[in-house]
Amino acid sequence: MVFSELTFLYFFFPTVILLHFFAGPKLRNLIIFLTGILFYAWGEPFYVVIMLFSTLIDYTAGRLMAKYDDDNKKRKACLIVSICMNVGLLAVFKYSDFIFDSVNALTGLKLSNPVLLVNKALNGIAPFGLSEKRVDLPIGISFFTFQSMSYTIDLYLRNISVQKSFLNFSSYVSLFPQIVAGPIVRYEHVAGELEKRTVNLTKINSGIGMFIKGLAKKVILANNIGAVWTEIKAMDYGNISAATAWIGILAFTFQIYFDFSGYSDMAIGLGRMLGFEFPINFDHPYISKSVSEFWRRWHITLGSWFRSYVYIPLGGNRGGTLKTLRNLLIVWALTGLWHGASWNFVLWGLYFGLLIIIERIGFGKVLEKLPSGVRIVYTFLAAVFGWVLFDTDTLADAGRFIAAMFGGGGAAIDSFAKYTLVSNSVIFTLCILISGGLGDALIKHVTEKNKRFAAVAASVIKVGGLILCTSYLVGATYNPFLYFRF
């Protein structure tokens, strides 16, 4: 089933663009705010209240910080309330089940999640979960809480000025192009554009191109290669061949990249059409030559957020080697936990943290002496094994799958692996070439050679790409957005 938010973009966004383009400056943020609320409520009719609550608390905290500008204790109290509220929302809706499951598993107790008890006591009408067994996760809660927190933290640090208009601030939090799946747009990135922004046909044309580029990544590449992983993931890992296991995890490796980078491109394009310039979130991470470089190219805005608001406040690399290593492990454990409430995610974060530490304490210098191709293969394989932890359900599943990759399932290759590889050879080849930067390099080359031809070709590609993507979506039965669950 086609995801409802994507349907919203297709059918409602052209109208929003027109309204926004012809509206006066004073009405544009109102359009942004109302559209953002409608967009979020389209997929989460109950939890839009949570987003508005977070927005109100952080806006109020900001105004109080400005009011008590000379009283650092009161300013700090406002900051603490903001952080506790946002972290509290994450704790309740994202981590409460995980916390109680972990405590019960370690102690043998059978404690019940009090959030669900409240919901049950109120006969299911409390917006804490729509089932009696698990708390439902609001779409994109990790994204909008981190964005909103960046405002109050930067305001406390006096990096930005207070936003006095509730409409402007709520427009920032509810910017629907990226509210549910990033990139994480810090307030300082768009503060000026919230007050005054330029909207013209040049920006709209550029935004359309970026949107279609992201849509093609998602619909044509991520969905098709992702179907391979979905089929293999459902198999018994004890009976699959090594080749099947490798084909499956390589499929997921490309699926998650094109899914998330595709949505990020779509968000950047949509934002540009509205006069906003969101930060780039991906920069061809699979051609990185070290794990450290990989994380400077993958989910760039998340890495920047943790660096600014966790790593540097902890001391960064200023307290000596041991404290630097401690700070890195804390950041990477939190990075893993941010992605999901399970020990798989925590270990996934620590796995990358340890690799980065190993590179920092000496292996990085060894890497620099190796050929570029060897370094790229090393980094790519490190990412591949990380994705096993990331998308298997339990640590036991991850262990069985990695064992299968090395022949634990018996055969090295079987007929299923041969058929799957041959039938998906074209999509695998496209994924390898495009993730390696061939597409961008080709566009740059053509543009530099003949700008007039490039302009005509770009128009043809935009129209053709939109038609092709739409035709895929119309008949699609598999269209997940992986990062919506975070």
Image (cartoon, grey):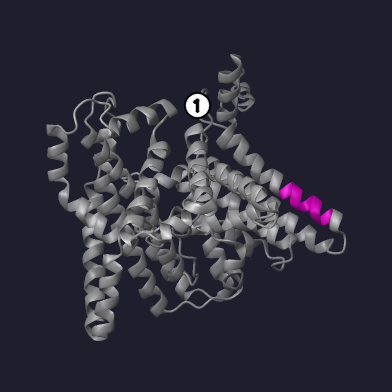
Reply above or below: 352 against 244. below
Q: What residue is drawn where x is 34% and y is 61%?
A: 372
- Counting from the top left corner in percent of width and height, residue 70 is at 87, 64
Chief secondary structure of the magenta portion: helix
User: If the image is split into quadrants, where does the N terminus sit?
Assistant: top left
Q: Name the residue that disc number 1 marks.
A: 131
> Is residue 86 rendered to the left or right of residue 14?
right
Looking at the picture, tell me which residue is in the foreground, 464 or 327: 327
User: Viewer-proximal residue, 447 or 216?
Assistant: 447
Q: Which image quadrant for residue 373? A: bottom left
Q: Is residue 34 left or right of residue 92?
A: left
Looking at the rendered structure, the kind of residue marked 1 is Ser
Q: Position of residue 387 (x, y in %)?
A: 39, 42
Question: Can I make out residue 7 in this image?
Answer: no
Q: Secondary structure at mark 1?
A: loop
- Percent position (x, y) of residue 204? 39, 73
Dot 1: within a 10 Å radius of its alpha carbon, few (fewer than 14), some, or many (20 or more) residues? Answer: few
Q: Which residues are magenta?
A: 74-82
Q: Taking 232 as reference, is 23 above or below it?
A: below
